[in-house]
Amino acid sequence: MDIGLVLQCTPPAARVIELARLAETYGFSHVWTFDSHLLWQEPYVIYSQILAATRKVMVGPMVTNPATRDWTVTASAFATLNEMFGNRTLCGIGRGDSAVRTQGGKPATLATLRQAVEVIRELGNGRSARVDDAVVRLPWAAGSRLEVWVAGYGPRALDLTGAVADGFILQLADPDITAWTIARVRAAAERAGRDPAGVRICVAAPAYVTDGTDAALAHARQQCRWFGAMVGNHVAEIVAKYGATSDIPTALTDYIEGRQGYDYNQHGRAGNVHAEFVPDAIIDRFCLLGTPDDQLIRLRELAGLGVDQFAVYLQHDAKISTLEAYGESVLPRLAPLTA
C-alpha cells in the first residue's frame, strides 16, 4: 500500500512545499492538495514548486472540479507540469464542493463530470478530445501521461467512477463503508467491460498518532472532528437525493441527524464550530487515531479490502510529528524490506 499526503494550500506557500518535501524524505508516495481558490492559494502554482523540490512523489488535487476551471486549461496545466517534471501528476476530480459553493454555485452534474473526465484525460495523454462541437488537441503534449481519479460517495457517483475513472478516491477510512464503495465501483467497472482490478483505490482521512493514553486520544478526536463535519456535508446531499432508507450504509448516513448547517469559512479546519454534532464513534471509524500499532491495524485492514493508497489529511496541530511517526514507525513496518 502507498501512503500519500493531503495538504491545504494555506499560506505561506513555502510551508506547503516544505511539508511535501519532508513527506518524500519519509517515504510518502503522493502529495495531494485541496483545490479551492477562494479559501486557499492556487494549487497549480504550488505544484510546480513541489515537483521542483522533490524527486519521486506524484502530485495532484484532491479534488478539482469541472465548474471553476476550463477543462482544456486544466489538462494543459497537467501536461505542462508533466513535460517539466517527468509525468509526475495525476488529477483527482469530483462534482465540486467548497470551490463552487463559496461562489454561490452548485456542484456539477454527474453527466458534466463524466464529460470533464474524458476531456481532461484525453488531452492530458496527448490525444484528441471533443469539446462541444470542436475536436481539439495539445499538439505539444504527446509525451504526457495523466490518470484521472474520481471522488464520490453516492451510488451514481460510484457507478460513474467504475465506468470511466482510472482511480477512486474515498474520503473516509471506515472499513465497512470502504468495502461497500469498492464493491460498487468494481461492479460498475465490470458492467462497463473494464477490468475491475484496474481501478486504483485511494482512501483519504486524517491520521493522528498518539501515545496510547486516553487524554491523547481525546485531543486527537477534537483535532479531527472537522473531518466528520466535512464528510457530513456531502452525506447530507446524498440523503436528500436518495433518502435515508436507500442501500447506502447507515454508518454513513445516521450521524448527520444533528447537523445544523455548514460554514465554508471554517472548511477543513480543526476546531470547526459546526462539527460538534459528530460523535466520537464516527471520528474513530472515519479517521486513523492512536499509536503506530493502532494505525497499522487499520491500514492492513484497508489493504485487505483492496485499497492501494491511504492518503493522510494533515489538517491538525501535529503535522511534523505525524510525518515523523509515519516515516519512522508506520511505513517501514507496512512494507518491510525483503531479507
Image (cartoon, grey):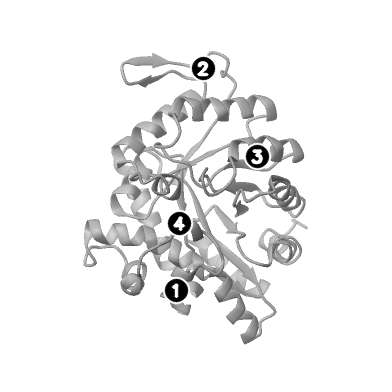
Q: Which residue is mark 2?
A: 138
Q: Which of label 2 and label 4 is nearer to you?
A: 4
For the residues labelled 1 and 4, the Cα–Cα distance comes to: 21 Å
Res 294 label:
none
For the residues labelled 2 and 4, the Cα–Cα distance comes to: 36 Å
Nearest the camera: 26 or 256? 256
Classify 10 Å Cα crowding around label 4: few (below 14), some (14-19), many (20 and above). some
> Upstream in the sequence, badge 1 or badge 3?
3
For the residues labelled 2 and 3, the Cα–Cα distance comes to: 23 Å
Quarter-of-image position of residue 47: top right
Res 264 label:
4
Q: Amino acid at mark 4?
A: Tyr
For the residues labelled 1 and 2, the Cα–Cα distance comes to: 45 Å
Percent position of residue 22, x then y:
75, 52
Quadrant of the frame with the C terminus: bottom right
Q: Amino acid at mark 2?
A: Leu
Q: Which residue is mark 3?
A: 46
Residue sitting at x 37%, y 50%: 185
Q: Is residue 255 above or below residue 83?
A: below
Q: Amino acid at mark 1?
A: Ile
